[in-house]
Amino acid sequence: MDDPRPPSDPPTAGTSAEGAAPSVAPLGAPRDGRAMLQRIRHQWGPTDDLWVFGYASLIWRPEFDADEHRPGLVRGWHRALRMRSRVNRGTPDRPGLVFALMPGGSCRGMVYRVARARADAELDRLWAREMINSVYDPRWLPCQTAQGRVMALAFTLSRRSPSYTGRLPDEEIIQILRLAQGHCGSTLDYLCETARCLDERGMTDHEVRRLMALARQHRLA
């Protein structure tokens, strides 16, 4: 199950088992999506298939063609509804929320494999979707699966990001769930779909369940 308790960034987060350098831009540096993509490609083995870790909408709407998918567990990171969304699930005037992969704890999700022959094209499609505003810090993270460990690309968020909300009071979350609507739908729909997909796969996330109980308590779900 997910455990969001550890409060700070692990010092080794974003570093592969082989000791590769982190794939994030230094603090204060311009967030250049092309440069981050180049770093990700540089750290990726030239003959390796592409593995991608999905923890929210990538589970129920991946929008890329995978040759295989399996449940996976990432340690050192957890799923948190603490990222502002001003386009997809909200607006600049009334921002919504989306899940982010935050430092600390652990996270169960789905890991997808794309065969190397198609991986470059599929990575470009994925990058256009996830990195349109270069908000995320993409990283290669070790992901445990029943068939063994893989290094998977994951889109993480730093607590230093201006898109990070911190812990919001439940009253504010309820207002967002009630009112926030963006290009791809509402924050409420996004939360409900993520919760449904996790439950279908037996992936217990106590905070997601708490948020769903809160939404039901206020007659939103």
Image (tube, grey):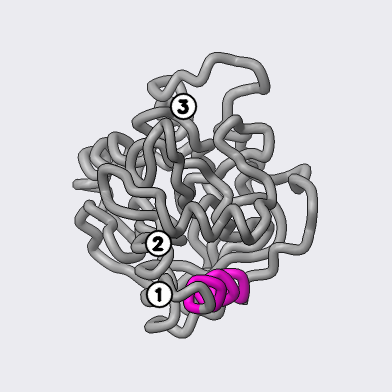
| Image quarter of residue 68 | bottom left
Earlier residue among tags 2 and 3: 3
Name the one closer to the observer, 202 or 76: 202
Q: Residue 216 at what x, y percent from top left?
A: 48, 77
Main secondary structure type of the part rendered in magenta: helix
Residue drawn at point x = 54 percent, y = 14 percent = 30
Q: What is the number of the mark on residue 188?
A: 2
Does residue 53 show up magenta in the picture? no
Name the one closer to the observer, 24 or 113: 24
Does residue 207 show up magenta in the picture? yes
Q: Nearer the viewer, mark 2 or mark 3?
A: 2
- Residue 142 visible in this rendered orientation of the protein: no
> Is the residue 91 above or below the residue 83 in the image?
above
The answer to the question of whether label 1 and label 2 lie on touching residues, with beta carbons closer than 8 A, is yes
Residue drawn at point x = 40 percent, y = 52 percent = 179
Task: Say what amino acid the circle numbered 3 marks.
Answer: Met
**Quadrant occupied by the C terminus:** bottom left
Number of numbered discs: 3
Span of residues in magenta: 205-216
Task: Say what amino acid the circle numbered 2 marks.
Answer: Leu
Residue that mark 3 sits on? 36
Task: Say what amino acid the circle numbered 1 marks.
Answer: Ala
Q: What is the number of the mark on residue 5?
A: none
Residue that mark 1 sits on? 221
For mark 3, give the secondary structure.
helix
For mark 2, give the secondary structure.
helix
Earlier residue among tags 1 and 2: 2
> Is the residue 99 above or below the residue 149 in the image?
above
